[in-house]
Image (spheres, rainbow, N blue to C red):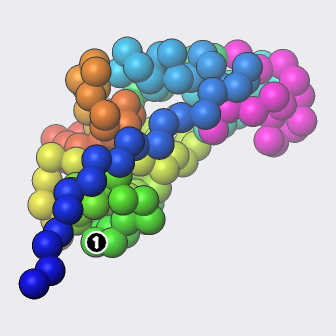
């Protein structure tokens, strides 16, 4: 006879650096902030110490609209970490933000089988104290395609 023992495994959290600290502080408040180069005006995500387009170190933070389009995705049925085992299946997606950069996120509050490339999505408010990652998206059928 085999018995299954339920384990509680803590979820890995973000690794904060001097460069990423403003991003994660805003994320905890359900706000998505991205960097914008003051020289070439390109927006970028994930935060970095210099612009990925022109190498300028003259970067500022702007609040993103929190809307975008699913660029690609996968439905995860076997997670790479045991802390997410109970959440399977879940959608891991690369979302192209309306400001231009792409970010890795989850698409939640929907049947994973309904997610598709080109689908409009919107930032989901984060529940403080939740173990869920703070910046997740949900389908938004009424958003216009950009």
Task: Give the residue at x 27% y 53%.
Answer: 7
Q: Quadrant of residue 16?
A: top right
Left-right relation of 133 to 58: left
Place of residue 95 in the rendered image (x, y in percent of width and height, measured from the top left):
44, 50
The foreground one among 131 and 39 is: 131
Residue occupying image coordinates x 47% and y 16%: 26
Query: What residue sits right under mark 1 in the picture?
Result: 77
Tell me the residue at 10%/84% (across/down).
Answer: 1
Magenta stretch prevailing secondary structure = loop
**Percent position of residue 104, x then y:** 48, 50
Picture quadrant of residue 119: bottom left
The quarter in which the C terminus is drawn is top left
Q: Residue furthest front?
A: 1
Which residues make up the magenta segment? 46-60
Residue 83: x, y in percent? 34, 52
Quick check: 33 above or below 86? above
Say if the magenta span includes residue 137.
no
Tell whether 8 sits left or right of 44: left
Q: Nearer the viewer, residue 126 or 61?
A: 126
Residue 78 in view in this figure: yes
Residue 120 appears anywhere in the view: no
Secondary structure beneath label 1: loop
**Which residue is drawn at the image coordinates 54% and 48% (left, top)?**
102
Left or right relative to 115: residue 29: right
Where is residue 116 drawn, in percent x and y? 28, 66
Queried whether the magenta region covers residue 48, the answer comes back as yes
Q: Is residue 43 above or below residue 78?
A: above
In the image, residue 63 above or below residue 95 = above
């Amino acid at each position: 006879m085999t018995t299954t023992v339920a384990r509680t495994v803590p979820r890995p959290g973000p690794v904060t650096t001097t460069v990423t600290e403003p991003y994660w502080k805003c994320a905890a408040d359900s706000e998505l902030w991205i960097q914008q180069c003051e020289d070439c005006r390109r927006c970028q995500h994930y935060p970095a110490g210099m612009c990925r387009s022109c190498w300028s170190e003259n970067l500022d933070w702007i609040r993103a609209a929190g809307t975008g389009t699913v660029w690609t995705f996968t439905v995860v049925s076997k997670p790479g970490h045991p802390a997410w085992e109970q959440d399977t299946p879940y959608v891991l997606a690369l979302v192209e933000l309306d400001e231009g950069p792409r970010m890795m996120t989850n698409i939640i509050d929907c049947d994973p089988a309904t997610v598709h490339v080109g689908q409009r999505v919107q930032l989901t408010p984060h529940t403080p104290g939740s173990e869920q990652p703070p910046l997740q998206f949900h389908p938004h059928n009424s958003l216009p395609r950009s």
